[in-house]
Amino acid sequence: MTVIRPAKIEDAAAMACVHVDTWRTAYPGIVPEEFLANLSYERCQAGWLEVLTEPQSQTHAFVAENEQGEIVAIVSCGPIREAVAGYDGELYTLYVLKSWQGTGCGKQLVRKVAQDLASRGYHTMLIWVLKDNPACRFYERLGGRLTTEREVEIGGKQLVDVGYVWLDLAVFKD
């Protein structure tokens, strides 16, 4: 049984591990190897601490814990960061440890984000995903509609980010 709960300051180190480890398992062959090798748990932890301690932050973060209380997946969301006409909420990050992919916790976290955004008055949700990421199929199965794309640079390599949107967050109600 996975427990979904709001992230706390003391979760930052574990969140950083999930974040970095997920990048290293999801992006070989997509993102330059040197970039993946240089990812740092410490820098990532500092970033999550900033999100979790900023009193004015509109970013909400949630974690999924296994039965032993270990964090196995993380998610964050808030107002859309880069204006895309017609969309107001954004699922910023969703990272699920490889060993937990396919267990349903990713779907639970997306549902939690959609409910959180809706409770704050947002009507739509967008997530940016690297086009070559196998997780694109996950978002499609959840009803995400591919609507836009942009170029991004990661580790000196030009990549394509695709935007999946949900036009009605009510589809995620329990």
Image (cartoon, helix red, strand yellow):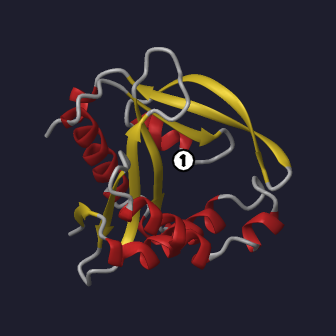
What residue would you read off at disc 1? Answer: 135
Query: Which one is nearer the viewer's eye here, 42 or 140?
Result: 42
Q: Residue furthest right?
A: 156
Image quarter in which the C terminus is found? top left
Query: Which one is nearer the viewer's eye here, 127 or 27?
Result: 127
Image quarter in which the N terminus is found? bottom left
Q: Quadrant of residue 42?
A: bottom right
Does residue 102 appear left or right of residue 66 in this picture?
right
Q: Quadrant of residue 123?
A: top left
The correct choice, above or below, for 140 with respect to 75 in the image is above
The correct choice, above or below, for 107 with respect to 83 in the image is below
Q: Residue furthest top?
A: 86
- Across and down, in percent, residue 19 comes to 53, 66
Give amino acid for label 1: Ala
The correct choice, above or below, for 121 with respect to 43 in the image is above
Does residue 38 appear left or right of residue 149 in this picture?
right
Query: Which one is nearer the viewer's eye here, 171 or 169?
Result: 169
- Across and down, in percent, residue 104 comes to 32, 56
Q: Residue furthest left?
A: 174
- Across and down, in percent, residue 55 comes to 32, 56
Q: Secondary structure at mark 1?
A: loop
Q: Total label count?
A: 1
Q: Quadrant of residue 73?
A: bottom left
Residue drawn 40% across the image and 52% down it = 76
Residue drawn 66% across the image and 38% down it = 131
Does residue 59 appear left or right of residue 65 in this picture?
right
The correct choice, above or below, for 137 with respect to 26 in the image is above
Does residue 110 appear left or right of residue 80 in this picture?
left
Residue drawn 36% across the image and 21% down it = 167
Residue drawn 38% across the image and 58% down it = 54
Badge 1: how crowded within 10 Å, few (<14), some, or many (20+)? some
- Across and down, in percent, residue 101 comes to 44, 61
